[in-house]
Image: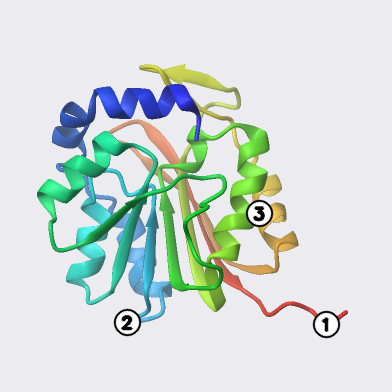
Amino acid sequence: MDDQTISVYDSSAEQIAALHKTLVPARVYQLINQFFVKNGVCADVGCGIGRDSSWLSEQGYSVTGIDASEGMLQQARGFYPNISFVRDSLPLLERQTDSFFVNVLCSAVIMHLTEDQIACAVVNLVRIATVGGIIIVSFRGTNSKDRRENGKLYSAIEVDKLVSLFVQSETMLLHREIDYQEDRRVEWTNIVLKKLPLLAV
């Protein structure tokens, strides 16, 4: 992840936690209920304060929360001490085992990566998923240009290109949508993918 963005999350963890605890990504939860493999082991990549990890746990999933910001992880461990949280980051996810997670959630993270990092992140999100596993990626739009907001990087992501990167990494697109949140005046893109077996050469 972009180093300056991590620094912002570290230094503002308490304030961000107070805001994020009140926000509920209702549409993402609907997609999880529709597509995730029931009772499958989950990775919440970019878990932040652990809100979504906690919700997944309440739904009966075994979940590991993963984040690059130690400040955010401290908040998560304080709020949800019964959930496993580890420090690791996109694009590499170096501490995560290949083909381990049946379900992978990556919400509000990928837009904090540079274009080169996004390509690498796609490979590693797919790598940690099992064959047949489900990957849900949700990210905020940026009006077609890279910018910083309160010090955090928001990359302009071409959705077609992102989907193509996933398809090239042996996944199948199951669902794609734009979720415009009128109350916050922000546009989110949600994509759902399924990891396919490697094709025989």
Measure the alpha-carbon separation of dots 3 and 2: 26 Å
Give the x, y percent position of residue 103.
43, 70
- Is residue 197 placed above or below 151 in the rendered structure? below
Give the x, y percent position of residue 133.
51, 75
Q: Nearer the viewer, residue 54 or 193?
A: 54
Q: Nearer the viewer, residue 97 or 33?
A: 97
Q: Is the residue marked by circle 1 packed among few (<14), some (14-19), or many (20+) residues within 10 Å?
A: few
Q: Is residue 10 left or right of residue 95?
A: left
Using the image, tell me which numbered label, if any, was put on residue 200. 1
Give the x, y percent position of residue 154.
49, 28
- Is residue 189 placed above or below 193 in the rendered structure? above
- Picture colour scheme: rainbow
Q: Which residue is mark 2?
A: 39
Task: Give the residue drawn at x 53%, y 65%.
Answer: 128
Q: Nearer the viewer, residue 96 or 32?
A: 96
* Residue, far right: 201
* Residue, far front: 95
Q: Which residue is mark 3?
A: 163
Amino acid type indicated by mark 3: Val
Q: Earlier in the sequence, mark 3 or mark 1?
A: 3
